[in-house]
Image (tube, grey):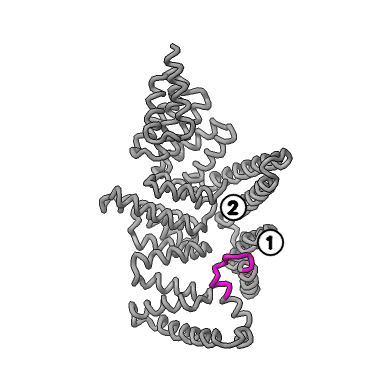
Amino acid sequence: MDIDNLYQKAVQASDAGNYDYAIEILQQVLVFRPDHAKARRALHTTALKKAKRQPKSGLSRLLGGGFHLLMAKLLKALKKYEKGVAHAEKALLSDPGNVNALLLLAECCALANYSESAIDTYERVLEMDPKNPRALKALGNIYSEMKNIKRALECFEQLVKVAPTDNEAAKKLRDLSALEIMDRTYTDATDYRKVIRDEREAEAIQVSEHFLRSEDDVERALVFALEELERKPDEVRALLKVSDLYRRKGDFDEARKHLERAIELNPTDATLKMKLGDLEIYRLERELKALKDELRAAGGKDEAIEARIREQEERIHRFKLEEYERRVEAHPTDTGFRFTLGTLLFEAGEYDRAVSEFQQSRRDPQYRAQSLAMLGRCFLKKDMPDLAKKQFHEGLKGVEIMDDRRKELLYYLAEAHEASGELEEAMKRYEEIYEEDINYRDVADRLARLREKKKAE
C-alpha cells in the first residue's frame, strides 16, 4: 500500500467536498502510519469542513463524542496512549471544534511517542485557542527539549502573559532568555563551533531546527537519542525513540532490537507488539518500493523484476493478514482492526471469513458504509447477487452526496443487477454515475455495452 498516494487521494477528496470518503482514507493512513502528522491535521481539517457544511446540534455532538472523550481520558490514565489517541480522534470527528478533545489528542500523541503529531496537534490547539496555558506549556517544553529556543521562548512568553502567577513558567522563561542571548552572541562570532564549549549541544540545536528533514539529520538525532538511552537504559520511551530513528534510517535489525527490549520491559503492553508488526510492514513495503524503483530504472519492463515485485506483494499481504488476525484476536471489539482484516481476507479470496468480519465492523457507524460495500462485494463473488444488492442499497442510505463512496456503491449495485439479468436497473445505476463523472472507472464502456445488448434483444 502506497501511503503517500493514499494521503494525496484523501486530500483531493477533501478538496472536492467528499468529506466522508476523505475521512475514511485518512483513518486508513493513520492505521499504517500513526505518526503521519499531515494526515492527522488533514483529518481534523476535513472534519471541521464537514461540520460547517452539516452542522450538528450540541446534544448530538455531546452524545457522539462524549463517550470517546471519556475513554481517551481513561486510557491515558491507564497509560494505554495509542488507544487513547484513537478515541480522542473519534471524539474530534463528532465534535471537531472541541479544544479539550484536541488537547487530549496532543497529550496522548506525545505520550505515545508520536512526536511530529504531538507538535502539530498542540499547534492546532493554539490556532483555535491562542491563550491555552496547557498547550503553551507543553509545546514550550517540547521545543525546549528539542533546543528550538526561539519557538520555546514564544510559547513561554505567551504563557507568562496568560498565567502571570505561574512561577515555574517564569523561571523557564528566564532560563530560555539566557540561552537565546548566548545563542545570538555565538551566531555573531566568527567561528560558531569554537565559541560554543559544548560542541555536542551545537549539533543538537542544528538537528532539532531541521526537524529531521534529511538523512544526516536522522543520523545526528540518533546519536543524541542513543546518549539519552545510555543515561536511561530501562526507559521505554527512550527505547522507542531510538527504534523509530533506526527505522527512519533503514536499519531494521537495530530498530527491532530496541523495540523488543521495550516489550521485555513492558510485556503486557499490546500496543508495543503492534508497533513490532508495523515495523515489519514498513520494512517489507520499503523493499517493495525499492523493487519498483529498480523496475522504473529498467524502463518499466523486466520480467525478472516484475516476478520479484509480485512475490514481495504476496509476502506483504500474507504478513498483514497474519498480523491483523493477531490484532483481532487480542482486541475483538476493535472494529477498525476487523474491517482491515476483512479487507485482507477479501483480497485473499476468503469470502466467508471476510463476511464474518464485515458483519462485525458494520455495527460501528464509522465503518458502516464501507463495511456494507465490502459485504456486497463478497456476496457478488459468492454468486449471491440478491444479497449483494441488499447491502449496497443499505449502504446508499447513508451516503447522499455523489462522492467516490456513492459512486462505488452504485457501480457494484449495477454489477449486481447485471448478474441478476436486470439490465434496465443496471443501466440506471451506471447512468447515475455517468451523469456526474464520465471518467469513473469503465462506466462509459459498460453503459455502451448494455445499450448495444438492449438493442440486439
Name the amino acid, label 2. Asp
Compared across the picture, whether 322 is left or right of 337 comes to right
Residue 71 percent location from the top left of the image: 41, 56
Looking at the picture, does residue 442 appear above or below residue 316? Answer: above
Residue range (magenta): 206-216
Seen as rendered, the residue at the extreme right is 304
Q: Quadrant of the C terminus?
A: top left
- Determine crowd level at label 1: few under 14, some 14-19, many 20+ residues with C-alpha closer than 10 A: some
Q: Is residue 208 magenta?
A: yes
Q: Nearer the viewer, residue 82 or 407?
A: 407
Q: Residue at x 68, y 48 (%)?
A: 297
| Residue drawn at 41 percent across, 60 percent down | 73
In the displayed structure, 187 sits above or below 27; it is: below
Relative depth, front residue between 295 and 74: 295
- Reading the image, the residue beneath label 2 is 278
The 10 Å Cα crowd at callout 2, few under 14, some 14 to 19, many 20 or more, is some
The percent position of residue 193, horizontal first and vertical second, equals: 62, 83
Q: Position of residue 295 (x, y in %)?
A: 68, 45
**Residue for badge 1:** 254
